[in-house]
Image (cartoon, helix red, strand yellow):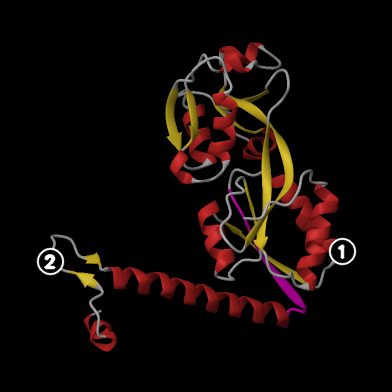
Amino acid sequence: MRDLERLLGVSLFDRSARQTRLTWAGQVLLGEARRVLATVDQAVQATKAAAQGYQSYLRIAICDSLAQPRIASLLARSREEEPELGIRVFDLPFSRQLKGLHDDLLDVGFALSDAVTGGLIAEPAWSDPLSVIVPTRHPLLAHAQVKLEDALKFPLVLCHPDAASGCHDQIQALLDGAAITPKIADHVTSLGVMLTLVGAGYGIGFAIGAQVQTCQRPDIAIRPLAGITPTLTTYLLRRQSEPSEPMKRFLQRARRLFRPQGDVHAP
Protein backbone atom coordinates (compact mmCIF):
# COMPACT_ATOMS: atom_id res chain seq x y z
CA MET A 1 0.00 0.00 0.00
CA ARG A 2 2.85 2.41 0.75
CA ASP A 3 4.35 1.65 -2.67
CA LEU A 4 0.98 2.53 -4.24
CA GLU A 5 0.82 5.75 -2.20
CA ARG A 6 4.31 6.72 -3.39
CA LEU A 7 3.36 5.92 -6.96
CA LEU A 8 0.20 8.05 -6.79
CA GLY A 9 1.71 10.75 -4.62
CA VAL A 10 -1.24 10.71 -2.20
CA SER A 11 -2.07 9.29 1.21
CA LEU A 12 -4.62 6.49 0.94
CA PHE A 13 -4.77 5.70 4.68
CA ASP A 14 -5.02 7.80 7.80
CA ARG A 15 -2.66 6.02 10.18
CA SER A 16 -2.81 8.58 12.98
CA ALA A 17 -5.85 7.06 14.72
CA ARG A 18 -5.98 3.80 16.64
CA GLN A 19 -7.56 2.17 13.62
CA THR A 20 -6.25 2.61 10.10
CA ARG A 21 -8.86 4.33 7.96
CA LEU A 22 -9.12 5.26 4.33
CA THR A 23 -8.60 8.92 3.50
CA TRP A 24 -11.02 10.59 1.09
CA ALA A 25 -8.53 9.91 -1.70
CA GLY A 26 -8.43 6.27 -0.61
CA GLN A 27 -12.21 6.03 -0.66
CA VAL A 28 -12.31 7.48 -4.16
CA LEU A 29 -9.66 5.03 -5.37
CA LEU A 30 -11.54 2.11 -3.79
CA GLY A 31 -14.77 3.11 -5.53
CA GLU A 32 -13.05 3.55 -8.87
CA ALA A 33 -11.18 0.26 -8.48
CA ARG A 34 -14.44 -1.56 -7.83
CA ARG A 35 -16.00 0.06 -10.88
CA VAL A 36 -13.03 -0.93 -13.06
CA LEU A 37 -13.11 -4.50 -11.76
CA ALA A 38 -16.86 -4.68 -12.45
CA THR A 39 -16.25 -3.39 -15.98
CA VAL A 40 -13.50 -5.95 -16.57
CA ASP A 41 -15.74 -8.73 -15.23
CA GLN A 42 -18.52 -7.66 -17.58
CA ALA A 43 -16.09 -7.59 -20.50
CA VAL A 44 -15.07 -11.15 -19.68
CA GLN A 45 -18.69 -12.27 -19.41
CA ALA A 46 -19.62 -10.53 -22.67
CA THR A 47 -16.73 -12.24 -24.42
CA LYS A 48 -17.79 -15.64 -23.08
CA ALA A 49 -21.38 -14.95 -24.10
CA ALA A 50 -20.26 -14.08 -27.64
CA ALA A 51 -18.27 -17.33 -27.81
CA GLN A 52 -21.43 -19.21 -26.80
CA GLY A 53 -23.38 -17.68 -29.67
CA TYR A 54 -25.14 -14.76 -27.97
CA GLN A 55 -25.37 -11.76 -30.32
CA SER A 56 -25.98 -9.28 -27.50
CA TYR A 57 -26.75 -9.26 -23.80
CA LEU A 58 -28.53 -7.22 -21.14
CA ARG A 59 -27.59 -6.63 -17.51
CA ILE A 60 -30.63 -6.62 -15.25
CA ALA A 61 -30.83 -5.88 -11.51
CA ILE A 62 -33.66 -6.78 -9.13
CA CYS A 63 -34.16 -6.12 -5.41
CA ASP A 64 -35.04 -8.85 -2.94
CA SER A 65 -38.55 -7.53 -2.16
CA LEU A 66 -39.95 -8.07 -5.66
CA ALA A 67 -42.33 -10.76 -6.83
CA GLN A 68 -39.77 -13.09 -8.37
CA PRO A 69 -42.31 -15.17 -10.39
CA ARG A 70 -43.01 -12.10 -12.54
CA ILE A 71 -39.30 -11.64 -13.23
CA ALA A 72 -38.99 -15.35 -14.02
CA SER A 73 -41.88 -15.08 -16.50
CA LEU A 74 -40.22 -12.14 -18.26
CA LEU A 75 -36.87 -13.90 -18.49
CA ALA A 76 -38.49 -17.09 -19.77
CA ARG A 77 -40.38 -15.10 -22.42
CA SER A 78 -37.15 -13.36 -23.45
CA ARG A 79 -35.32 -16.65 -23.76
CA GLU A 80 -38.16 -18.11 -25.83
CA GLU A 81 -38.56 -15.15 -28.19
CA GLU A 82 -34.91 -14.11 -28.43
CA PRO A 83 -32.62 -17.04 -27.59
CA GLU A 84 -29.59 -15.20 -29.00
CA LEU A 85 -29.93 -12.54 -26.29
CA GLY A 86 -27.80 -13.20 -23.24
CA ILE A 87 -29.09 -11.91 -19.90
CA ARG A 88 -27.21 -11.47 -16.62
CA VAL A 89 -29.22 -10.91 -13.44
CA PHE A 90 -27.92 -9.16 -10.32
CA ASP A 91 -29.54 -8.89 -6.89
CA LEU A 92 -28.94 -5.24 -5.93
CA PRO A 93 -30.65 -2.71 -3.66
CA PHE A 94 -32.15 0.42 -5.15
CA SER A 95 -29.19 2.70 -4.43
CA ARG A 96 -26.73 0.36 -6.14
CA GLN A 97 -29.07 -0.02 -9.09
CA LEU A 98 -29.00 3.75 -9.59
CA LYS A 99 -25.20 3.79 -9.45
CA GLY A 100 -24.94 0.82 -11.82
CA LEU A 101 -27.23 2.49 -14.35
CA HIS A 102 -25.31 5.77 -14.14
CA ASP A 103 -21.96 3.97 -14.55
CA ASP A 104 -23.25 1.91 -17.51
CA LEU A 105 -22.78 -1.31 -15.54
CA LEU A 106 -26.51 -2.10 -15.78
CA ASP A 107 -29.12 -1.78 -18.51
CA VAL A 108 -32.32 -2.34 -16.53
CA GLY A 109 -33.32 -2.25 -12.88
CA PHE A 110 -36.47 -3.41 -11.14
CA ALA A 111 -37.19 -1.77 -7.78
CA LEU A 112 -39.99 -0.49 -5.56
CA SER A 113 -38.98 3.17 -5.86
CA ASP A 114 -39.28 5.75 -8.62
CA ALA A 115 -36.98 8.25 -6.88
CA VAL A 116 -34.50 8.23 -9.76
CA THR A 117 -31.78 10.80 -10.27
CA GLY A 118 -30.86 12.80 -13.35
CA GLY A 119 -30.56 10.91 -16.61
CA LEU A 120 -32.70 7.95 -15.50
CA ILE A 121 -36.34 6.99 -16.08
CA ALA A 122 -38.64 5.06 -13.73
CA GLU A 123 -41.55 3.40 -15.54
CA PRO A 124 -44.35 1.66 -13.59
CA ALA A 125 -44.04 -2.01 -14.50
CA TRP A 126 -46.66 -3.78 -12.38
CA SER A 127 -48.46 -3.68 -9.04
CA ASP A 128 -48.84 -6.52 -6.53
CA PRO A 129 -51.43 -6.75 -3.74
CA LEU A 130 -50.01 -6.16 -0.29
CA SER A 131 -50.49 -8.98 2.21
CA VAL A 132 -50.13 -9.34 5.97
CA ILE A 133 -47.33 -11.68 7.05
CA VAL A 134 -47.85 -13.28 10.47
CA PRO A 135 -46.28 -16.08 12.51
CA THR A 136 -47.99 -19.46 12.49
CA ARG A 137 -50.52 -19.85 15.32
CA HIS A 138 -51.23 -16.11 15.30
CA PRO A 139 -54.69 -14.74 16.27
CA LEU A 140 -55.08 -13.01 12.89
CA LEU A 141 -55.12 -16.42 11.17
CA ALA A 142 -58.71 -16.80 12.38
CA HIS A 143 -59.65 -14.41 9.55
CA ALA A 144 -59.57 -15.27 5.85
CA GLN A 145 -58.89 -11.57 5.22
CA VAL A 146 -57.43 -9.12 7.73
CA LYS A 147 -58.65 -5.58 8.25
CA LEU A 148 -55.87 -3.02 8.43
CA GLU A 149 -57.09 -1.73 11.80
CA ASP A 150 -56.94 -5.28 13.20
CA ALA A 151 -53.41 -5.77 11.89
CA LEU A 152 -52.25 -2.51 13.48
CA LYS A 153 -53.19 -3.81 16.93
CA PHE A 154 -49.98 -5.86 16.79
CA PRO A 155 -46.33 -4.70 16.65
CA LEU A 156 -44.93 -4.29 13.13
CA VAL A 157 -41.64 -5.22 11.50
CA LEU A 158 -41.12 -2.68 8.71
CA CYS A 159 -38.58 -1.78 6.06
CA HIS A 160 -35.94 0.58 7.36
CA PRO A 161 -36.42 4.13 6.04
CA ASP A 162 -32.67 4.56 5.47
CA ALA A 163 -32.63 1.56 3.13
CA ALA A 164 -34.23 3.81 0.46
CA SER A 165 -35.84 0.74 -1.08
CA GLY A 166 -39.19 2.30 -1.89
CA CYS A 167 -40.87 -0.48 0.07
CA HIS A 168 -40.79 1.69 3.19
CA ASP A 169 -42.28 4.73 1.45
CA GLN A 170 -45.17 2.82 -0.13
CA ILE A 171 -46.10 0.98 3.07
CA GLN A 172 -45.68 4.12 5.17
CA ALA A 173 -48.19 5.92 2.94
CA LEU A 174 -50.68 3.17 3.80
CA LEU A 175 -49.97 3.48 7.53
CA ASP A 176 -50.20 7.27 7.46
CA GLY A 177 -53.82 7.00 6.36
CA ALA A 178 -54.79 4.53 9.11
CA ALA A 179 -56.85 5.58 12.13
CA ILE A 180 -54.55 3.64 14.48
CA THR A 181 -50.97 4.69 15.16
CA PRO A 182 -48.79 1.64 14.46
CA LYS A 183 -46.43 0.16 17.05
CA ILE A 184 -43.05 -0.54 15.48
CA ALA A 185 -41.19 -3.57 16.82
CA ASP A 186 -38.18 -3.21 14.52
CA HIS A 187 -36.94 -1.91 11.17
CA VAL A 188 -35.10 -4.20 8.75
CA THR A 189 -33.15 -3.79 5.52
CA SER A 190 -34.23 -6.95 3.70
CA LEU A 191 -37.22 -9.19 3.19
CA GLY A 192 -35.33 -12.17 4.61
CA VAL A 193 -34.67 -10.45 7.94
CA MET A 194 -38.29 -9.31 8.14
CA LEU A 195 -39.55 -12.87 7.63
CA THR A 196 -37.09 -14.16 10.24
CA LEU A 197 -38.32 -11.70 12.87
CA VAL A 198 -41.97 -12.33 12.01
CA GLY A 199 -41.43 -16.09 12.18
CA ALA A 200 -39.80 -15.64 15.59
CA GLY A 201 -42.86 -13.78 16.85
CA TYR A 202 -41.37 -10.28 17.16
CA GLY A 203 -44.23 -8.79 15.16
CA ILE A 204 -46.13 -8.95 11.89
CA GLY A 205 -45.18 -7.45 8.53
CA PHE A 206 -46.46 -6.37 5.15
CA ALA A 207 -45.09 -7.77 1.90
CA ILE A 208 -45.97 -9.08 -1.54
CA GLY A 209 -47.69 -12.39 -0.92
CA ALA A 210 -46.43 -14.02 -4.12
CA GLN A 211 -42.84 -13.22 -3.17
CA VAL A 212 -43.19 -14.58 0.37
CA GLN A 213 -44.72 -17.81 -0.95
CA THR A 214 -41.55 -18.52 -2.92
CA CYS A 215 -39.60 -18.62 0.36
CA GLN A 216 -41.65 -21.64 1.55
CA ARG A 217 -41.14 -20.91 5.24
CA PRO A 218 -43.13 -23.08 7.68
CA ASP A 219 -42.94 -20.47 10.47
CA ILE A 220 -45.01 -17.79 8.73
CA ALA A 221 -48.44 -17.45 7.12
CA ILE A 222 -49.98 -14.99 4.65
CA ARG A 223 -53.33 -13.25 4.78
CA PRO A 224 -54.71 -10.71 2.27
CA LEU A 225 -55.88 -7.35 3.51
CA ALA A 226 -59.65 -6.87 3.57
CA GLY A 227 -61.46 -4.14 1.68
CA ILE A 228 -59.74 -2.15 -1.03
CA THR A 229 -56.45 -4.00 -1.24
CA PRO A 230 -53.41 -1.70 -1.31
CA THR A 231 -50.64 -2.54 -3.72
CA LEU A 232 -46.90 -2.19 -4.06
CA THR A 233 -45.78 -0.81 -7.41
CA THR A 234 -42.62 -2.11 -9.06
CA TYR A 235 -40.77 0.23 -11.39
CA LEU A 236 -38.56 -0.51 -14.37
CA LEU A 237 -35.48 1.70 -14.22
CA ARG A 238 -33.33 2.59 -17.22
CA ARG A 239 -31.22 5.33 -18.69
CA GLN A 240 -32.96 8.20 -20.47
CA SER A 241 -30.85 7.80 -23.60
CA GLU A 242 -32.05 6.03 -26.73
CA PRO A 243 -32.14 2.28 -25.93
CA SER A 244 -30.36 -0.28 -28.05
CA GLU A 245 -32.39 -2.56 -30.30
CA PRO A 246 -32.18 -5.54 -27.88
CA MET A 247 -33.21 -3.17 -25.09
CA LYS A 248 -36.18 -1.89 -27.13
CA ARG A 249 -37.39 -5.44 -27.70
CA PHE A 250 -36.96 -6.25 -24.01
CA LEU A 251 -38.99 -3.18 -23.02
CA GLN A 252 -41.75 -4.08 -25.48
CA ARG A 253 -41.80 -7.62 -24.09
CA ALA A 254 -42.04 -6.36 -20.52
CA ARG A 255 -44.87 -3.96 -21.37
CA ARG A 256 -46.82 -6.67 -23.16
CA LEU A 257 -46.38 -9.09 -20.28
CA PHE A 258 -47.07 -6.73 -17.40
CA ARG A 259 -49.43 -4.22 -19.05
CA PRO A 260 -48.32 -1.36 -16.82
CA GLN A 261 -50.67 1.48 -16.03
CA GLY A 262 -49.68 5.11 -15.70
CA ASP A 263 -47.20 7.37 -17.43
CA VAL A 264 -43.45 7.17 -17.51
CA HIS A 265 -41.94 9.27 -14.71
CA ALA A 266 -38.81 11.16 -15.60
CA PRO A 267 -36.82 13.36 -13.24
Residue 100, image x, y percentages: 55, 64
Of helix, strand and loop, which one carries label 1? helix
Residue 21, image x, y percentages: 23, 64
For the N terminus, the quadrant is bottom left
Q: Nearer the viewer, residue 82 or 229?
A: 229
Residue 78, image x, y percentages: 81, 61
Residue at the spot x=51%, y=55% of the render? Answer: 95
Which span of residues is magenta-colored? 51-63
Q: Nearer the viewer, residue 243 or 20?
A: 243
Is 111 above or below relative to 12? above
Is 217 above or below relative to 111? above
Identify residue type, mark 2.
Ser
Identify residue type, mark 1.
Glu
Is 235 above or below relative to 147? below
List the single residue furthest toward the bottom: 7
Q: Nearer the viewer, residue 129 or 47?
A: 129
- Per the rendering, the mark at residue 16 is 2
Report crowding for label 2: few under 14, some 14 to 19, many 20 or more residues within 10 A (C-alpha): few
Residue at the spot x=52%, y=13% of the render? Answer: 153
Numbered disc in front, either 1 or 2: 2
Magenta stretch holds residue 60: yes
Magenta stretch holds residue 98: no
List the single residue furthest toward the front: 267
Of helix, strand and loop, which one carries label 2? loop
Quadrant of res 229 = top right
Residue bearing the label numbered 1 = 81
Q: Which of disc 2 and disc 1 is earlier in sequence?
A: 2
